[in-house]
Amino acid sequence: MANDFGFIGIGAMGYGMAMNIRKEIPNSSTLFITDVFRPSCEKFKAEFSSHGPIEILDSAREVAERALTIISIVPSANNVRQVYLDNEHGIIAAKANPDRLMLECSTIDVETARDVGETLIKANAGLYIDTPVSGGVPGALAGTLSFLVGKAKTANNSSDLLSKRLITVISAMATPEKIFYCGGLGAGLAAKISNNYLCGTILLATAEAMNIGIRSGVDKHVLYEVIKNSTGQSFMCDHVNPVPGVVPHAPSSRDYQGGFKAQMMVKDMTLGVDAAKVTGVRSTLGPAALEVYKEAAMDPRCINRDVSVIYRFLDGPE
């Protein structure tokens, strides 16, 4: 058990992350996986069993009973509560183990993470650390994600063994210089929510600005070069440019495939707007952007497509 690992959530991001875990851990270690969509687990096992044993389990509780180190990434706060706190199938239902290390990579609200983490500590179920990630599916597959770490203040935090385990696990999925220790439990999520709030508003502003310039007669390639080399330059414009054919590697230039779905942006922007309310921050751009993303998420042109399709939703010229 000490050298075995568990992975909960073999979705788009989780698939690549679990792949790198299986490749990096010892061949003698078993990777236990589970997901509500079992075909994803079966595909994963068929593809990566050559790197070492993989076993598919039916619940988070079963994973916790077999693995001392667990990584999870699921869609929502309710899913996180089910994974960790369900009295029958959750991790808390497994035998208590203070040495259990749990890395929760989902993007959820800070309050839920703190409640889950504190409940697990009181139950002697182990140490829960919020470790949301950034870098998208490409980063997950390449093992170059950013990890934003929030750790509860417990006696275990001083353990050299725990620190080594934490950095070893994260390093299998991240670039070392992109591992950030943000503070106590929930701090990693606070940083992630802040970053996503900025990404969402910048992407929408980029789509509107490109639309204005193109409709005014500026060639889209020239306009991009102007922005890239001027004060409007941003990561979103350079790598997620919403105008098709401007940046070859952007999803918009690949028929909006891959990347981050428009429907998920509603979730992330909602988390940002709600966090602003909780912390007493006057939020002006976020609520307006959120309403646009809500409209886009329901539009037939945007269903199951990368969020950069927002440009098409705004009736931008191709």
Image (cartoon, grey):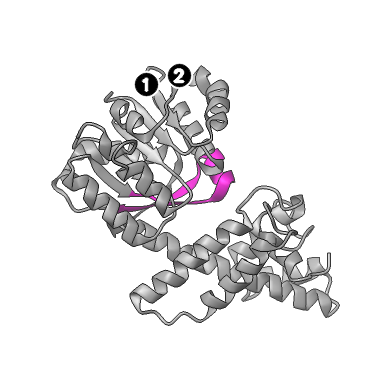
Going by the numbered disc 1, the residue's amino acid type is Ser
Which is more N-terminal, label 1 or label 2?
Answer: 1
The N terminus - image quarter: top left
Is residue 132 within the magenta segment? yes
> Do tag 2 and tag 1 residues touch (Cβ < 8 Å)?
yes
Q: Under tag 2, what secondary structure?
A: loop
Total marks in image = 2
Q: Residues within 10 Å of mark 2 (few under 14, many from 20)?
A: some
Give the distance between the C-alpha atoms of the residues marked 2 and 1, in whole angstroms: 7 Å
Going by the numbered disc 2, the residue's amino acid type is Gly
Residue 136 versus residue 16 in the image, above or below? below
Instruction: Mark yes or no: residue 4 visible.
Output: yes
Residues shaded magenta: 130-150
Q: Residues within 10 Å of mark 1 (few under 14, many from 20)?
A: some
Residue at the location (79% across, 65% down)? Answer: 221
Label number found at residue 29: 1
Residue at the location (44% across, 54% down)? Answer: 107
Residue at the location (53% across, 51% down)? Answer: 135
- Quarter of the image for residue 123 reads top left
